[in-house]
Image: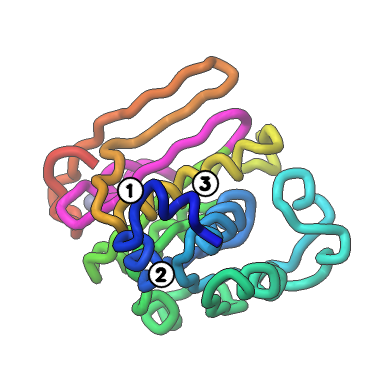
Amino acid sequence: MRSRQEVFIGREKQEILEKSTVAVVGLGGTGHAAAEYLARAGVSLILADNDVVERCNMGRQSYGADDVGRLKVVVMEERLSPLTSVESHAVMLSDINIDKILSKADIVLDGSDNFGARFLVNDWCVKRGKPFTYTGAIRAEVSFCFWLPGRPCLRCVFSGKTADDSCEKDGILSPVAAFAGTLSAIEALKHLIGEKPVEGLVSFDFFESRFEVLKAKGREGCACSGQGML
Ligand SMILES: [Zn+2]
């Protein structure tokens, strides 16, 4: 099934992927695409989301008309379990359940759409030394970073963040969130097979045809004790 990938990375690294587990928090525009391609690549998944599919999701998320009203975790588990092992949780992540849900993951991919949820994941991963990815997608813009122990964390980079951008308010071009999710999946796979993930805050603006990697410094006193660049 994964012969093309194996030609590229080799049997040994394919076996590493097949023994790895990635948690995807949120199965919206970014998370559903990340989960889909991680399953196809062979990693086991832990999925957490408590939303149901709405008709307005279908413009950018690969849910079908028959899925409307069903839990996203249930739809994705049905779709992806023929490809890999899938453990799903129809809950909103909280201080109470986060340990139980994410502990087994080798990496956490955050597909949340608000900084409250992102900081919850950030703080838990920093405390546990667990790698995680951040993704943001709005209009024709994507931002992304990969956190590893020793690097500055989201609280270092976004400490002044008071309000969330919102696709509902500002809109988004249809494929942009899925691009962000796929990028996140690629970087997770790289890390699992020993390739160095991208450093810095990666930023794409497709309408401006601009791609940048921004440097971010650690914030003094932050729990991450991050040094150097994000
Ligand atoms: Zn920090």
Q: Amino acid at mark 2?
A: Glu
Q: Amino acid at mark 3?
A: Thr
Q: What is the crowding at mark 2: few (fewer than 14 residues within 10 Å), some, or many (at least 20)?
A: some
Which of the marked residues, 2 or 3, is nearer the chain's N terminus? 2
Task: Report helix, strand or loop for mark 2.
Answer: helix
Which residue occupies 22% across, 66% down? 129
Is residue 102 in the magenta section?
no
Left/right of residue 171 with respect to residue 183 in the rendered view = right
Furthest-right residue in view?
65
Indicate the quadrant containing the C terminus: top left, top right, bottom left or bottom right.
top left
Q: Give the residue number, with chain letter if any, for mark 2.
A: 18
Image location of residue 126, percent across then percent down: 25, 62
Q: Give the residue number, with chain letter if any, for mark 1.
A: 146
| Any part of residue 56 in sight | yes
Is residue 151 in the magenta section?
yes
Q: Nearer the viewer, mark 2 or mark 1?
A: 2
Q: Is 62 placed above or below 89 here?
A: above
Q: Closer to the camera, 78 or 218?
A: 78
Q: What is the crowding at mark 1: few (fewer than 14 residues within 10 Å), some, or many (at least 20)?
A: many
Q: Which residues are magenta?
A: 138-163
Which residue occupies 51% across, 35% down? 142
Distance in Å between CA atoms under marks 3 and 1 = 13 Å
Which residue occupies 24% across, 71% down? 128
Distance in Å between CA atoms under marks 2 and 3 = 18 Å
Label annotation for residue 182: 3
Q: Amino acid at mark 1?
A: Phe
Q: Is 187 placed above or below 25 here?
A: above
Q: Closer to the camera, 28 or 105?
A: 105
Label annotation for residue 24: none
Image location of residue 43, percent across then percent down: 45, 66
Q: Is 44 placed above or below 4 here?
A: below
